[in-house]
Image (cartoon, rainbow, N blue to C red):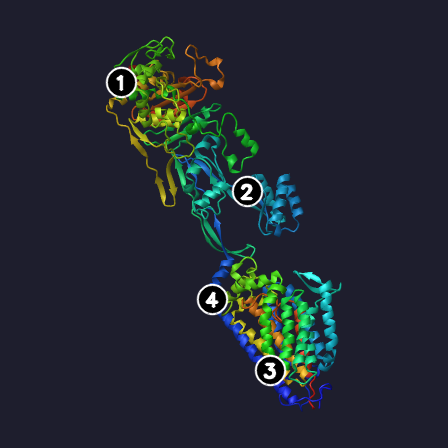
Amino acid sequence: MFLNKRAPIRNLNAENTLFMRRALLAFIGVIVLVLVLFTNLFQIQINLYEDYQTRANGNRIKLIPVAPNRGLIYDRNGVLLAENKPVHSLELIPEQIKSLEQTLTTISSIIELSETEHSNFIKSAKSQRRFKSITLKNQLTPTEVAKISVNLHQLPGVSIDARLKRFYPYGPSLTHVLGYVARITKKEQATISANNEETVYAATRDIGKQGIEKYYQRLLHGSPGHQEVEVNNRGRIIRVLNYHPPTHGQDLYLNIDVKLQQRAFDMLEGRRGSVVAIDPNNGAVLALVTSPSYDPNLFVHGISSKAYKKLLSRDKPLINRATQGTYPPASTVKPLIALAALEENIISDRTYINDPGWFKLPNVNRKFRDHLKWGHGKVNVYKALEKSCNTYFYDVAYRLGIDKLSSYMTQFGFGEYTGIDIHEEKSAIMPSRGWKRARYNQPWYIGDTISLGIGQSYWTVTPLQLAKSTATLATNGKVFVPQLLGASQSEQGLIQIPANQASTINLKDDNNWNIIHKGMWNVTNKLGGTAYKVFGDAPYESAGKTGTAQVVGIAEDQKYDKDKIHERLRDNAIFVGYAPFENPEIAISVAIENAGHGGSSAAPIAREIFDIYLEHINTSLQPSLVKQQQLSGNPVL
Amino acid sequence: MMPSSSDQKGYARKASFWHRIHLDIPLLLGLLLLMCVSLVVIYSASGASIGLVKRQALHIVISLAVMFAVAQIPPDTIRRWALPLFTFGVAMLIATLLFGHVGKGAQRWIDFGFAKFQPSEAMKLILPIMIAHFITRHALPPQIKHVMLGFVIVLIPTLLIAKQPDLGTSILVASAGLFALFLAGMSWRIILSFAGAISAFIPILWYFLMRPYQRQRVLTFLDPESDPLGSGYHIIQSKIAIGSGGLTGKGWLNGTQSQLEFLPERHTDFIFSVFCEEFGLMGVVGLLCLYMFVIARGLIIATRAQDPFSRVLAGSITLTFFVYLFVNIGMVSGLLPVVGVPLPLISYGGTSMLTLMLGFGLLMSIHTHRRFNK
């Protein structure tokens, strides 16, 4: 018998039975607990299978947005104005590189690496995941791309990445029309979030900042596609499961004629000014030029602060003078004031006044001077427009009164936004009693009205407003909203943008239009007209009005002498006009700062633009016939 | 060939070759199958890298050798070493607390310079040996005073390990000791009042003994979705892995949760989730059957043992093995809090494998040192 020495009396059989019972009990317990485990696993793997399957896929499948290509921009003749060009950058994936230091040395022996490029790379290499590619150098030149490419076989983990960047082939001449694209800022990101457009911009880096690029951002942008990829827990892409391509942005066709635009920009070179040309029959903007300008391509890649400082110069190249420059309209608004006076029966085409060289209010000593010291003598509306006689319009304005004058001019769009399809626009000022009370808290003085008659005093206009009002005049009262966009091309096809006629100005006597047209015809076609020297030999007939706006007030007994006055204080030269005289196809405003007389400085640019745009008339009309008409002096009304 | 079939015919037969070299073939086959599963799943869980598999194979070879060596020691010798082993073990635990190596906010190792020693692991075997020895010195069922003393013996190492703190190991050590007492036949009255005492102890444990990170684990366990990126991440990803495996699994090496590394601790504590994801519920059933076979064989060995000490020791080693299994599967499938218990014999790791195989060595020793001519 085997016995424990310390336990002399033991019932081993009973102990054995007890143990058997306990062991059996334990085994039953084990089975019960295993069943508990099994039930739980059954619940998870069978009953909740689909739920967990979905979550497993949610873990591993990620959607990576793919940015759409931005729509291209063309001019009215299909000339490319904004395109997407591949820009190459040098990318390194640290994970695939054995020795970063050695690779960097090899690369810098092939192409030039700056100190900042080197240190920026080291910095981001430390903070990013090792399998993500890091940019070492941006904007590689074609030579650099070639040099790296032939050496790629000995540079594992190094690659050249091509990304599309906006490029504006015409550079500064179209900057203020097209605007530009640049990196999305925090503020813009907030706007995107507020509009619930985060998914639309998920893969997009750049956004339109100004001009057409900003105004038509939505059309140009398109909608993103996406890649369905499998990722691991650190976000590394393991493989691509699916690809849904993006919808590219719409291509835009502008009403701009780049030939006109370029020529006008060249002619303004070295000067501060603007040229706006509009098709009066539909409001299409044919040219919208401002000078000086700047190269929009600088902003696409992020402008350096040094280059940006240069743009903050006194000449203000960042301002779109055509839509944001506000100038006194000077004599260019005389035809419209005459029209208002004719409508109000204050004058007729047979009304003559005597111009002694000055205008004086009854019982007031101050004289409002004409630009001819000795006066124009007997003047009717035709002569007043042809010679731009100030005295005549002092008198007309005085008799018209501020309220009627202001109301008529407002109908022609002064003091209001034109509604052109860019955001950079000013409304300028059409003064009225209410305006002066609100602005200066002063009553309106009659003297203020007199100055308005020659487009001075508080009255300011933008060159675009001038072109628009000239177009309205040219079409006998059709007011069109100026439009830069002519058509858009999407996958669905070409969509023409219809003309947007805002209103029509109806006159009591339609013949009043003809009186004004004739007066303006005189300016460019009649010997002695203020712009006759410029337009007299044109192969088509035109109409126009010059303007010479004072920048500083000249005391009544002082004579303006441009040579004695600082350049910045010299008169602004303005010209408005339209052509051909019958059935006008183009209306224009040219404004040049501190250039002196409108007839000699601004009108030649208008003439050049007319010539280019009306080239077809050059060939279809016989010059001899035109000359005959001019000599006869009888405009066809 | 199978010695087990010869066993059943009676004691009169001459011992087989396997018995003479002190191996139990059914148990060994079960263990070897589990080890094969281990290598297969570790290969997948480590992202098809052979390195970890090789090292685990080395762990397996060493553990088998140790098991074989231990199987040669007669149970009676082990019984005589019980008190010195226990004294040594407790001393080492105290030393660990004083000079131990700190890892993951807990002191678990003593660094001897050439090797790291984890006394708490050894205690998983020493404690049941000690209890079995202590309780079976007297007639069974044990008297109350012996059971009470037994509790004290269990409590000393358990508290020392819990203080490190290592909740998982202290649970395993305590259950090894308590199973010994249970199998020795302590009365139901004591068991019930003990259960009552434990329920009363829970608030004390919560407020005074648990470290904040342990409390956080419990809170996360109760509602893992409350902190999906923080401490709930493990358990959520584990359940996603298990659930998305479905009935048939995604196939070996095809588990997205494990291959794409969403699952944490893939080749150690959470290896069961990898298995579930790739082999599905059908694989799980097979694996559970294999484990049940090993446990059943262990209990059979216990019931066939000839002396009370061997019976109690074999039974408690087997049941502790089950506690490993239950706690690990329970924790990866969201039934139990995450306490850091590996899946026995399958999780990657040398220490736990060695301890477990030492235990199975004891089982084999007990089974093959029986005297047939009583």
Q: Amino acid at mark 4?
A: Leu
Cα distance in 3D space between marks 3 and 1: 125 Å
- What residue is disc 4 on? A48
Q: Earlier in the sequence, mark 2 or mark 4?
A: 4
How many numbered marks appear? 4
At x 68%, y 74%, the residue is B152
**Which one is in front in this view, the residue at disc 2 or the one at disc 4?**
4
Cα distance in 3D space between marks 3 and 4: 37 Å
Who is closer to the viewer here, B221 or A584?
B221
**Which one is in front in this view, the residue at disc 2 or the one at disc 3?**
3
Is residue A191 toward the left or the right of residue A157 in the image?
left
For label 2, the SS is: strand
Q: Chain of mark 2?
A: A
For label 1, the SS is: loop
Q: Earlier in the sequence, mark 1 or mark 4?
A: 4
Residue A34 image position (x, y, % from top left) = 54, 75
**Which one is in front in this view, the residue at disc 3 or the one at disc 4?**
3
At x 44%, y 45%, the residue is A194
For label 3, the SS is: helix
Q: Chain of mark 4?
A: A
Q: Amino acid at mark 3?
A: Arg
Is residue B108 visible in the rendered structure shown here?
Answer: yes
- What residue is disc 1 on? A346
Cα distance in 3D space between marks 2 and 1: 69 Å
| Labels 3 and 4 share a subunit | yes
Query: Residue A88 has which mark?
Result: 2
- What residue is disc 3 on? A22
Q: Earlier in the sequence, mark 2 or mark 3?
A: 3
For label 4, the SS is: loop
Q: Chain of mark 1?
A: A
Who is closer to the viewer here, A523 or A454?
A454
Is residue B213 toward the left or the right of residue A316 in the image?
right
